[in-house]
Image (cartoon, grey):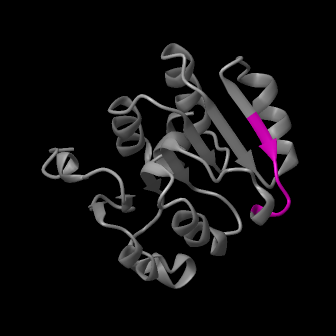
Amino acid sequence: MVEEINKYGTHLPLLLKVVEATKGSVLELGIGSSSTPALHKLCVEQRRRLDSYDTDVSYVDQYSKQYRSPFHSYFWINNWDHAGIDRPWAVVLIDHKPAIRRRTEAVRLKDFAEYIVIHDTEETIDRFYRFSSIWKHFKYVYHDERTPRNSVASNLMSVDWLKGNGE
């Protein structure tokens, strides 16, 4: 499990820091072995709403059985355009498939989310995710330069408090 978190959960330190600094509902786009258990635990402890969406029905089935709570809802989606996510969120995690949709949902939620945490934003793989095209849509952007890079974007809240965090 530790190897799995190290390999796929590089966004966890930044994500959890942002979640802990907020109070409202959390949206997870892309269920996974690192983010889902961590967000579930934190949101249940804090009695916060967590909505997890994925295009893989087996992930939705597996995690909804393993991590159950009245505070945590799971949604299988086959068309991101029809996902009912256009509403206020404290934190949104962008880590879903297909990869080409990640920038679409980031821009779509730019005026709904206090903070959007985006996984895998390093420039060396920009040819896959093309996140470089979305930063202009946000008033505030913070890039955690650890490899792989993860970012926080917002139009509602400053991200200056994340700079120089020593992590």
Picture quarter with the N terminus = top right
Picture quarter with the C terminus = top left
Pinpoint residue 119: horizontal percent, then vertical percent. 48, 58
Left or right: residue 162 versus residue 53 is: left
Q: Nearer the viewer, residue 74 or 2?
A: 74
For the record, the magenta segment spans 74-80
Pinpoint residue 57: horizontal percent, then vertical percent. 87, 47
Q: Quadrant of residue 48?
A: top right
Q: Nearer the viewer, residue 120 or 3?
A: 120
Name the residue at 34% across, 61% down: 147
Q: Is residue 77 magenta?
A: yes
Q: Nearer the viewer, residue 84 or 62?
A: 84
Left or right: residue 124 versus residue 21 is: right
| Residue 34 shows in this picture | no
Left or right: residue 134 versus residue 97 is: left
| Residue 151 shows in this picture | yes
Is 64 above or below relative to 3? above
Q: Is residue 101 magenta?
A: no
